[in-house]
Image: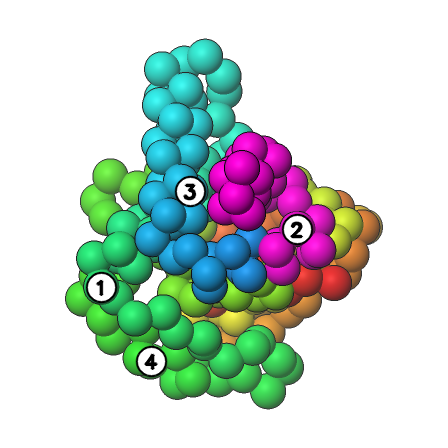
Amino acid sequence: MNEYEEFIASGILELYVLELTTEEENTEVGRMLALYPEQINREIHEICNVHEGIANAGYMEPDPIIKPFLLAKIDYMDRMMAGEVSSEPLELTPDSKISDYNEWLNRPDMVLPADAGEVFAKIIGYTAAITTAIVWINIIAPQEVHDDEYERFLILEGTCDIGLSDKMYSLKAGDYFQIPLHENHTVTVTSIEPCKVILQRVAA
C-alpha cells in the first residue's frame, strides 16, 4: 500500500470533512493535497456527497452550522476541480477593512441564493491553518464552542449581536470580532436583511 492509499485508509479525510481533525491532521491534509491534488479533492468531494445524502435522506438531523459548511466544501472543491485558482485572502485582524476582500465580494457567484437556509457559506480561501468564507446568517447561528481554532468575523452588511458567555456584543458593518477559545457563543441577527460576514477559522 503506497502513501496515498494509506492516507485514504486512515480515515483522516472523513474526520476532516466533519471538522473533527486536529491542527496536525489539518497540516497533513494540506500536505497530501499538495502532493495529490486531484485524488484528494475527488475523495473529499465523494465523502461530502455521502454525508450530504445521509443528511438529506433524514437519517440524521443535520447540524445547522455543519451542513452549510459541508455544502460549501463541496462547492469549493467543485470550483477547484473546474480550474479556479486557489487564493489566500488576508488574515482577519482588528485593522481589516471590507475593501480588503473586494476581489471576492465583487464576484457574481458570491451571492446569497433565494433558497438558502438559515446559514449559507461560500469558501473563498483554504489552507491547513486558515479557512475563509463569506457567510450569510438569516436569523441566528446556534451556540458553538471552539477548542482548537479561533473564529473571527468582519461584518459586511446588516447587524448582529454576538453572545459570549454572559456578555453581548452588538456589531455593524466594518466591525471585527474574535471568539476566544473554549467560549460558548451565539450569533443573533438584528437587521431586517441577513447579516453578511467574512468568517475566518484560524488554527490555535
Graded by Cα atoms within 10 Å as few (under 14), some (14 to 19) or many (20 or more), the crowding at tag 4 reads: few
Graded by Cα atoms within 10 Å as few (under 14), some (14 to 19) or many (20 or more), the crowding at tag 1 reads: few
* Residue type indicated by callout 1: Gly
Kindly report the distance in space between the C-alpha atoms of the residues bearing marks 2 and 3: 14 Å
Write down the region rendered in magenta. Answer: 1-28
Marks 2 and 4 close (CB-CB < 8 Å) = no
* Residue type indicated by callout 4: Asn
82 is higher (above) or lower (below) than 47:
below
Give the quarter of the image for residue 31. bottom right
Kindly report the distance in space between the C-alpha atoms of the residues bearing marks 2 and 4: 32 Å
* Residue type indicated by callout 2: Glu
Kindly report the distance in space between the C-alpha atoms of the residues bearing marks 1 and 4: 21 Å
Q: Earlier in the sequence, mark 3 or mark 4?
A: 3
Q: Could you tell me if residue 179 is visible in this image?
A: no
Q: Residue at x 37, y 48 (%)?
A: 39
Q: Name the residue under label 2.
A: 25
Q: Where is residue 57 in the image (x, y as percent from the top left)?
A: 36, 15
109 is higher (above) or lower (below) than 8:
below
Q: Which of marks 2 and 3 is nearer the N terminus?
A: 2
Graded by Cα atoms within 10 Å as few (under 14), some (14 to 19) or many (20 or more), the crowding at tag 3 reads: some
Kindly report the distance in space between the C-alpha atoms of the residues bearing marks 1 and 3: 17 Å
What label sits on residue 102 in the rendered view? Answer: 4
What label sits on residue 83 in the rendered view? Answer: 1
Which type of secondary structure does the marked residue at label 3 adopt?
A: helix
Q: Which of marks 1 and 4 is nearer the N terminus?
A: 1
In the displayed structure image, the side of residue 29 where residue 179 appears, left or right: right
